[in-house]
Image (tube, rainbow, N blue to C red):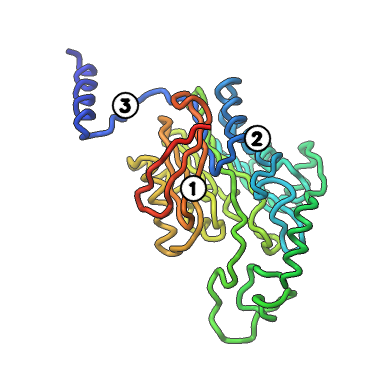
């Protein structure tokens, strides 16, 4: 018996007795994994990578663009999450696991196609991140149309917030009291310590789409798109366009994406941490749990989730601050797009497929 045949036999015997998980080199199946039950985004990305056999980068852009167009959950794309001026701005990024190149935009104004602009940053510049009006200028040079991102719904959200005396908001240790009135604010003259980070129950309207795609060539890409935190201070950029925080990809290992309280998540680079845990031998689920655990060790009530996939097409997720978390998966083994729901209340979070 040749050496390889002996190895396979021993591996199968060990696996049958629950001693090891066989992790032999194999061609990864095409895979799409994305945060939240944004199933149409999954369907479009899966069609791109599996049916049309497009590459991972293009398929991530296809999927995230679908959410931007559909204004998924009011937290992705135009017309959602108005800031303190009533304006919607967009954050997005795309990372190529084959080249370790990244393109990203933050606080993008007046352009709907945030993930596509991020791709242009990746393809047509030596930069990683462009922000604000300058990102808009770049987008115009790349042929993107500028338009008002405000909608009737975002105006209603903004006006209702003003009528509630700008409650909740994201200010601390300022005068006048941000818990009672609108600004403008100035630094407080009091010597009291800074208030906690969520003094008046900040609106949890920040459900980023994060997407991982593995194509037929085994190339991996990860991307994000969001309109950020509702009622944010103008100029705020969340974790979504930050490499290693919102998303991270490495062909040698896998990829991860995060969603949740971006101001806290970005301090821990959870997507990078999850990929590094997989590099050390952790399963995607274990890696996501480590990343979430690192955050909740310091901020136990933080809301969010991490999804992860390794280069073999295995996937998993972990979450906190919610009862449960649902994400989407598509591969040939499960017969196309499906929903997966995990329990956020337990440390061990069993997955459950829900056929659609």
Q: Is 310 left, or right, of 156 in this rendering?
A: left
Q: Earlier in the sequence, mark 3 or mark 2?
A: 3
Does 28 sit above or below residue 184? Answer: above
Does 169 sit above or below residue 30? Answer: below
Which mark's residue is nearer the viewer, 1 or 3? 1
| Mark 2 crowd level (few <14, some 14–19, many ≥20, 10 Å Cα) | few
Q: Earlier in the sequence, mark 1 or mark 3?
A: 3
Q: Are marks 3 and 2 in contact (CB under 8 Å)?
A: no
Which mark's residue is nearer the viewer, 3 or 2? 3
Q: Secondary structure at mark 2?
A: helix
Does 229 sit above or below residue 38? Answer: below
Residue 124 or 251: which is nearer the viewer? 251
Q: Is 283 left, or right, of 169 in this rendering?
A: left
Q: Earlier in the sequence, mark 2 or mark 1?
A: 2
Q: Position of residue 63 (x, y in %)?
A: 62, 34
Q: In this figure, which residue is indicated by the disc labeled 2? A: 123
The single residue placed furthest to the bottom in the displayed view is 190
Which mark's residue is nearer the viewer, 2 or 1? 1
Q: Which mark is residue 24?
A: 3
Answer yes or no: is residue 112 visible. yes
Residue 118's quadrant in the figure? Answer: top right
């Amino acid at each position: 018996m040749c050496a390889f045949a002996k190895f396979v036999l021993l591996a199968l015997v060990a696996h049958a007795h629950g001693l090891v998980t066989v992790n032999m080199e194999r061609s990864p199946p095409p895979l799409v994994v994305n945060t939240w039950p944004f199933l149409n985004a999954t369907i479009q990305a899966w069609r791109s990578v599996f049916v049309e056999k497009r590459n991972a980068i293009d398929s991530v852009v296809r999927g995230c663009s679908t959410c931007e167009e559909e204004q998924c959950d009011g937290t992705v794309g135009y017309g959602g999450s108005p800031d303190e001026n009533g304006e919607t701005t967009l954050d997005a990024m795309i990372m190529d696991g084959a080249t370790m190149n990244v393109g990203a935009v933050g606080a993008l104004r007046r352009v709907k196609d945030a993930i596509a602009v991020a791709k242009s940053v990746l393809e047509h510049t030596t930069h990683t991140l462009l922000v604000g009006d300058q990102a808009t200028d770049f987008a115009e040079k790349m042929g993107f149309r500028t338009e008002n991102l405000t909608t009737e719904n975002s105006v209603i959200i903004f006006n209702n917030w003003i009528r509630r005396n700008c409650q909740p908001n994201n200010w601390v240790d300022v005068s006048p009291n941000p818990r009672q009135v609108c600004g403008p604010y100035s630094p407080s003259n009091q010597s009291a310590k800074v208030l906690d980070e969520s003094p008046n129950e900040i609106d949890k309207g920040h459900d980023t789409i994060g997407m991982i795609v593995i194509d037929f060539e085994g190339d991996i890409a990860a991307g994000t798109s969001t309109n950020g935190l509702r009622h944010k201070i103008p100029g705020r950029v969340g974790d979504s366009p930050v490499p290693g925080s919102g998303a991270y990809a490495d062909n040698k290992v896998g990829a991860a994406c995060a969603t949740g309280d971006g101001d806290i998540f970005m301090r821990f680079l959870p997507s990078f941490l999850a990929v590094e845990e997989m590099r050390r031998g952790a399963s995607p689920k274990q890696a996501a749990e480590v990343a979430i655990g690192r955050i909740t060790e310091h901020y136990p009530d933080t809301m969010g989730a991490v999804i992860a996939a390794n280069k073999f097409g295995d996937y998993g997720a972990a979450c906190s601050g919610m009862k449960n978390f649902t994400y989407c998966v598509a591969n040939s083994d499960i017969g196309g797009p499906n929903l997966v729901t995990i329990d956020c209340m337990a440390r061990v979070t069993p997955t459950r497929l829900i056929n659609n």
